Amino acid sequence: MRLFMDTANIDEIRRGAAMGVISGVTTNPSLVAKEGIQYKDRVLEICEVVDGPISAEGIAQTADELVEEGKRIAAWHENVIVKVVMTEPGLEAISRLSAEGIGTNCTLIFSANQALLAARAGATFVSPFVGRLDDGGQDGMEMVREAVQILESFHLPTQVLAASLRHTRHVTDAALAGAHVATIPSTVLFQMLKHPLTDSGIERFLADAKGYTAV
Ligand code: G3P
């Protein structure tokens, strides 16, 4: 499973990328709004830091507008993936953009059937929102498992990108469910590398090392 960062904060992205574990970034209008910067400017900055798929989302509503906006967004940089919400016009836009070779990420997926539709329309990625489904008392990870099984059974090339992941266990479970990618907030990424036994182990090694002179 590849790891993407789900943030528009460039400092967090630089920190994550420096560890060599990040293969892409996902953004959305809510994440960029927190940064107080123009969407295009931030996406171009991210493209300088991470050499992989960078999802950028528009706000158009009709299929024609979505296609026009998607082409504009895709022209920002060769690594940009156009994020399109799961609606009827969204599916039409995905199918038209993908026919022109433009990568798409169908977002706001809340069922395996929606994932199947987006895959059939030609989406490069589908983004099931795990945490938001969990919030409503449903099992978000089951949707990921079903979507992976369906797409793989029928040899559809669309990748399942587990999104709305809120804690470290979600990342493990997404990997076990077979998600091709997990996009994770930076807080979760940095929590993943921590363990209290690692910290106490380091302390003990450092204390014991005082008993000899290092070469
Ligand atoms: O990738 C989708 C993500 O940004 C949404 O996460 O926590 O707002 O449900 P959340």
Image (cartoon, rainbow, N blue to C red):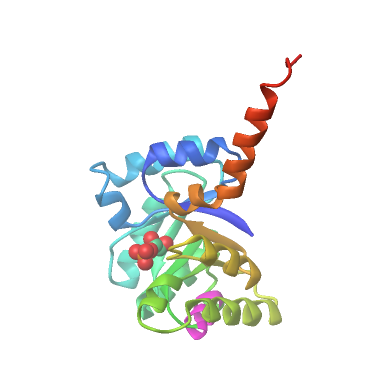
Q: Which residue: 55% across, 71% down?
A: 122
Residue 2, horizontal then vertical, whole percent: 61, 56
- Pick the quarter of the image with the N terminus: bottom right
Residue 38, horizontal then vertical, whole percent: 27, 43
The residue furthest right is: 215
- Pick the quarter of the image with the C terminus: top right
Q: How many marks?
A: 0
Q: Residue 181 lies in magenta, yes or no?
A: no
Q: Which residue: 28% across, 70% down?
A: 61
Q: Which residue: 30% across, 65% down?
A: 65
Residue closer to the observer: 101 or 34:
34
Residue 139, horizontal then vertical, whole percent: 48, 82
Q: What is the quadrant of residue 171 in the picture?
A: bottom right
In the figure, 147 relative to 60: above or below? below
| Residue 129 in view (yes/no) | no
Q: Which residue: 30% across, 50% down?
A: 32
Q: Give the dominant element type of the magenta stretch: helix, strand or loop.
A: helix
Q: Residue 116 lies in magenta, yes or no?
A: yes
The residue furthest front is: 211
67 with respect to 213 (left or right): left
Residue closer to the observer: 189 or 49:
189
Residue closer to the observer: 69 or 57:
57
Residue 46, horizontal then vertical, whole percent: 44, 40
In the figure, 36 relative to 163: above or below? above
Q: Which residues are magenta?
A: 112-119
- The quadrant where ligand 1 appears is bottom left
